Image (cartoon, rainbow, N blue to C red):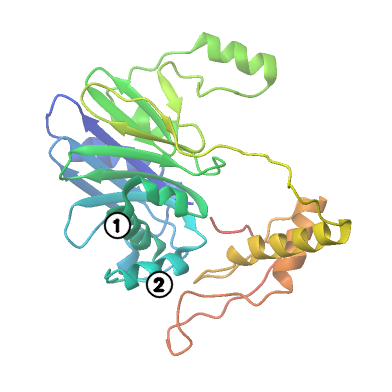
Amino acid sequence: MCGVAGVLNLDGSAASPIALRRMTDAIAHRGPDGEGHYTDGPLGLGHRRLAIIDLTPGGRQPMATTDGRYVVSYNGELYNFQELRIELQALGHQFRSRSDTEVLLAAWAQWGAKALDRFNGMFAFALWDRQARELTLARDRFGVKPLYYARAGDVFLFASEIKAILAHGAYRTQLDREALLEYFTFQNFFTDRTLFRDVRLLPAGCTLTVKEKGARPVRYWDYHFAESNAPLREEEYVEELDRLFRQAVNRQLVSDVELGAYLSGGMDSGSITAIAASSPPESTKSPSDSSSSTLRRSSRSSTPS
């Protein structure tokens, strides 16, 4: 995992680099491999890095497009970034790194918010459009990666964890009693509420574009279940499930560091590990790259995300 944190002062005042650093320091455990900070007038964007793909400085964040229009702080992984990279290169885009972060930026520059429909992965990111002066928050379809946000007066705050929002200093900590009742009733949250009043969790499959007058989440994806007009035989369903399952696992084996699996003893983690152990690990580096690392399979360490 990596850490995303930032602030947008809606009154136009300059973002404080000191407050921004406090936010990223609060989530330093999410990214021990590096940190980055970016400010542009009222916008402050911070990042803590856990390097998984492209371990070089070329993968550092916040990362900007070549023309400087878009800047992103991103947590997650696009499993289909290599396919997207080939498609974007055919459209004239050039890349300076092997990271999926740069592919995300190029895709947004090419297709705008419609790029989300092309992303296959788990992610949460904050993207600043310097030209439109807009901040966009986005979360993956299933909500694997978290992204919280809050507004304190004219200060809009966002981060991978609430503790980073609290570290800024603009938000005054208050208990959300209705959220507490929801948690005690269901032992979970089924809304976007948190235990902190006015701190919200961006829903899965949603974006949030922040402007001076405020913002509301917009859903870009939802579940759609439909029966096939031509039902298949049971053996065909089994074969298709096997194909899709293997494809899903193999997509997540792309890494420039060692891979591992965290086993709970259940059928799901055991099945995933069995497929991973029988598949060769993949790297974003070419075979001719002398710095390419040797990947080792392990059933004891945690899977990188």
Quadrant of res 186: top right
Q: Earlier in the sequence, mark 1 or mark 2?
A: 2
Q: Is residue 50 visible in the rendered structure shown here? A: yes
Measured as percent of width and height from the top left, residue 192 is found at: 50, 24
Towards the viewer: 259 or 141: 141
Mark on residue 135? none
Extreme residue in the front direction: 229
Q: Residue at x 33, y 62 (%)?
A: 102
Q: Residue at x 87, y 56 (%)?
A: 234
Quadrant of res 179: top right
Amino acid under label 1?
A: Gln
Q: Secondary structure at mark 2?
A: helix
Near mark 1 (Cα within 10 A), the count class, few <14, some 14-19 or many ≥20, is some
Amino acid under label 2?
A: Ile
Q: Residue at x 82, y 61 (%)?
A: 236
In whole angstroms, how far apart are the C-alphas of marks 1 and 2? Answer: 13 Å
Q: Say whether residue 301 is left or right of residue 88.
A: right
Residue 109 lies, with reference to residue 239, above or below; the image says above
Mark on residue 110? 1
Q: Which residue matches tag 2?
A: 86
Measured as percent of width and height from the top left, residue 76 is found at: 47, 52
Measured as percent of width and height from the top left, residue 60 is found at: 32, 61
Towards the viewer: 168 or 90: 90
Q: Say whether residue 234 is left or right of residue 75.
A: right
Residue 51 lies, with reference to residue 42, above or below; the image says below
Towards the viewer: 33 or 107: 107
